[in-house]
Amino acid sequence: MKITVEKLVRAPGEKVWLAYTTPEDIVQWNAASDDWHTTRSNVDLRVGGAFSSRMEAKDGSFGFDFAGTYTQVIPKQLLEYSFGDRSAKVEFIETPDGVNVRVTFDAEETHSLEQQQQGWQAILDNFARHVEGKGK
Protein backbone atom coordinates (compact mmCIF):
# COMPACT_ATOMS: atom_id res chain seq x y z
CA MET A 1 0.00 0.00 0.00
CA LYS A 2 1.16 3.52 -0.84
CA ILE A 3 0.82 6.52 1.47
CA THR A 4 1.00 10.12 0.25
CA VAL A 5 1.73 13.26 2.25
CA GLU A 6 2.13 16.74 0.86
CA LYS A 7 2.82 20.31 1.86
CA LEU A 8 2.94 23.66 0.08
CA VAL A 9 6.30 25.30 0.75
CA ARG A 10 6.11 29.05 0.19
CA ALA A 11 9.57 29.50 -1.33
CA PRO A 12 11.27 29.44 -4.74
CA GLY A 13 11.90 26.05 -6.37
CA GLU A 14 15.70 26.24 -6.17
CA LYS A 15 15.59 26.98 -2.43
CA VAL A 16 13.16 24.10 -1.80
CA TRP A 17 15.25 21.64 -3.84
CA LEU A 18 18.52 22.58 -2.11
CA ALA A 19 16.99 22.34 1.36
CA TYR A 20 15.64 18.87 0.56
CA THR A 21 18.90 17.54 -0.89
CA THR A 22 21.69 19.22 1.11
CA PRO A 23 23.01 17.37 4.20
CA GLU A 24 23.51 20.61 6.17
CA ASP A 25 19.82 21.40 5.72
CA ILE A 26 18.54 17.85 6.20
CA VAL A 27 19.95 17.64 9.74
CA GLN A 28 17.96 20.77 10.61
CA TRP A 29 14.51 19.61 9.51
CA ASN A 30 14.47 15.79 9.41
CA ALA A 31 12.53 14.89 12.57
CA ALA A 32 8.93 13.87 13.23
CA SER A 33 8.82 15.35 16.75
CA ASP A 34 10.76 17.69 19.03
CA ASP A 35 12.29 14.81 20.99
CA TRP A 36 14.06 13.44 17.90
CA HIS A 37 16.79 14.85 15.69
CA THR A 38 19.01 13.90 12.77
CA THR A 39 22.65 13.85 13.82
CA ARG A 40 24.22 13.33 10.40
CA SER A 41 23.26 13.09 6.75
CA ASN A 42 25.05 12.05 3.56
CA VAL A 43 23.78 12.58 0.03
CA ASP A 44 25.21 11.37 -3.29
CA LEU A 45 22.59 13.02 -5.49
CA ARG A 46 22.66 10.94 -8.68
CA VAL A 47 20.92 7.84 -9.99
CA GLY A 48 22.58 4.95 -8.15
CA GLY A 49 23.90 7.31 -5.48
CA ALA A 50 23.37 6.50 -1.83
CA PHE A 51 21.90 8.64 0.93
CA SER A 52 21.65 8.15 4.67
CA SER A 53 20.47 10.03 7.72
CA ARG A 54 21.08 9.06 11.35
CA MET A 55 17.93 9.70 13.37
CA GLU A 56 18.12 9.57 17.17
CA ALA A 57 15.99 10.27 20.20
CA LYS A 58 17.43 13.36 21.89
CA ASP A 59 17.65 11.46 25.18
CA GLY A 60 19.91 8.87 23.53
CA SER A 61 17.49 6.01 24.15
CA PHE A 62 17.14 4.93 20.52
CA GLY A 63 18.43 5.66 17.04
CA PHE A 64 18.41 4.27 13.54
CA ASP A 65 19.78 4.92 10.07
CA PHE A 66 17.41 5.79 7.25
CA ALA A 67 19.29 4.94 4.09
CA GLY A 68 18.69 4.09 0.47
CA THR A 69 19.63 4.59 -3.15
CA TYR A 70 18.37 7.17 -5.62
CA THR A 71 16.65 5.57 -8.62
CA GLN A 72 15.63 8.79 -10.39
CA VAL A 73 16.82 12.38 -10.00
CA ILE A 74 15.32 15.27 -11.98
CA PRO A 75 16.54 18.49 -10.33
CA LYS A 76 13.77 20.67 -8.85
CA GLN A 77 11.12 18.20 -10.09
CA LEU A 78 11.47 14.61 -8.87
CA LEU A 79 13.40 12.29 -6.58
CA GLU A 80 12.74 8.57 -6.46
CA TYR A 81 14.58 6.21 -4.17
CA SER A 82 14.56 2.73 -2.75
CA PHE A 83 15.15 1.93 0.90
CA GLY A 84 15.25 -1.72 1.81
CA ASP A 85 12.46 -3.43 -0.11
CA ARG A 86 10.40 -0.23 -0.22
CA SER A 87 10.43 2.83 -2.45
CA ALA A 88 9.42 6.47 -2.35
CA LYS A 89 8.78 9.30 -4.78
CA VAL A 90 9.16 13.01 -3.97
CA GLU A 91 7.54 15.40 -6.42
CA PHE A 92 8.32 19.13 -6.44
CA ILE A 93 5.35 20.81 -8.13
CA GLU A 94 5.74 24.53 -8.88
CA THR A 95 2.65 26.62 -8.13
CA PRO A 96 2.05 30.39 -8.11
CA ASP A 97 2.33 30.29 -4.29
CA GLY A 98 5.48 28.16 -3.98
CA VAL A 99 6.32 24.48 -4.36
CA ASN A 100 3.95 21.69 -3.47
CA VAL A 101 6.12 18.85 -2.16
CA ARG A 102 4.36 15.50 -2.47
CA VAL A 103 5.91 12.36 -0.98
CA THR A 104 4.48 8.95 -1.85
CA PHE A 105 5.98 5.91 -0.14
CA ASP A 106 5.41 2.22 0.42
CA ALA A 107 3.89 1.53 3.81
CA GLU A 108 5.58 -0.88 6.20
CA GLU A 109 3.90 -3.38 8.51
CA THR A 110 5.28 -2.45 11.95
CA HIS A 111 3.34 0.77 12.46
CA SER A 112 -0.26 1.61 11.57
CA LEU A 113 -0.96 3.45 8.33
CA GLU A 114 -2.14 6.42 10.40
CA GLN A 115 1.12 6.50 12.42
CA GLN A 116 3.20 6.35 9.25
CA GLN A 117 1.20 9.09 7.56
CA GLN A 118 1.40 11.31 10.65
CA GLY A 119 5.15 10.77 11.05
CA TRP A 120 6.04 11.49 7.43
CA GLN A 121 3.66 14.48 7.41
CA ALA A 122 5.29 15.87 10.56
CA ILE A 123 8.71 15.64 8.88
CA LEU A 124 7.37 17.39 5.78
CA ASP A 125 5.79 20.11 7.96
CA ASN A 126 9.18 20.61 9.67
CA PHE A 127 10.78 20.84 6.24
CA ALA A 128 8.37 23.60 5.18
CA ARG A 129 8.99 25.56 8.39
CA HIS A 130 12.75 25.23 7.90
CA VAL A 131 12.67 26.43 4.28
CA GLU A 132 10.21 29.25 4.91
CA GLY A 133 12.24 30.43 7.92
CA LYS A 134 15.54 30.63 6.04
CA GLY A 135 16.77 33.98 4.74
CA LYS A 136 16.42 34.77 1.06
Image (cartoon, rainbow, N blue to C red):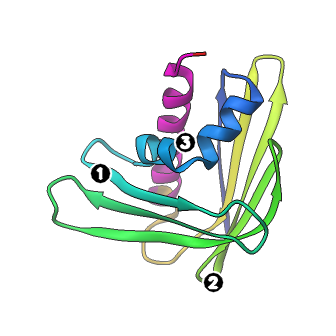
Q: Amino acid at mark 2?
A: Asp
Which numbered dot is residue 124?
3
Instruction: State yes or no: residue 101 in magenta.
Output: no
Q: How would you rate the neighbour count of disc 2 (Cα within 10 Å): few for under 14, some for 14-19, many for 20 or more?
A: few
Which numbered dot is residue 85?
2
Label 3 SS: helix
Which image quadrant: the C terminus?
top right
Instruction: Say above or below: 119 vs 100.
Output: below
Find the magenta span and give its range. Answer: 115-135
- Residue in view at x 60 percent, y 73 percent: 68
Q: Amino acid at mark 1?
A: Trp
Label 1 SS: strand
Residue 30, image x and y in percent?
45, 48
- Residue in view at x 20 percent, y 52 percent: 58
N-term-proximal mark, 3 vs 1:
1
Residue 119, image x and y in percent?
45, 52
Residue 94, image x and y in percent?
83, 30
Residue 10, image x and y in percent?
66, 21
Q: Which residue is mark 1?
A: 36
Disc 3 from disc 1: Cα separation? 14 Å
The answer to which of 94 and 23 lies nearer the viewer is: 23
Q: Left or right of 34: which side holds 38?
A: right
Disc 3 + disc 1, Cβ < 8 Å = no
Disc 1 from disc 2: Cα separation? 25 Å
Q: Left or right of 122: which side holds 84?
A: right
- Residue in view at x 41 percent, y 71 percent: 65
Which image quadrant: the N terminus?
bottom right
Which numbered dot is residue 10?
none
Label 2 SS: loop
Main secondary structure type of the part rendered in magenta: helix
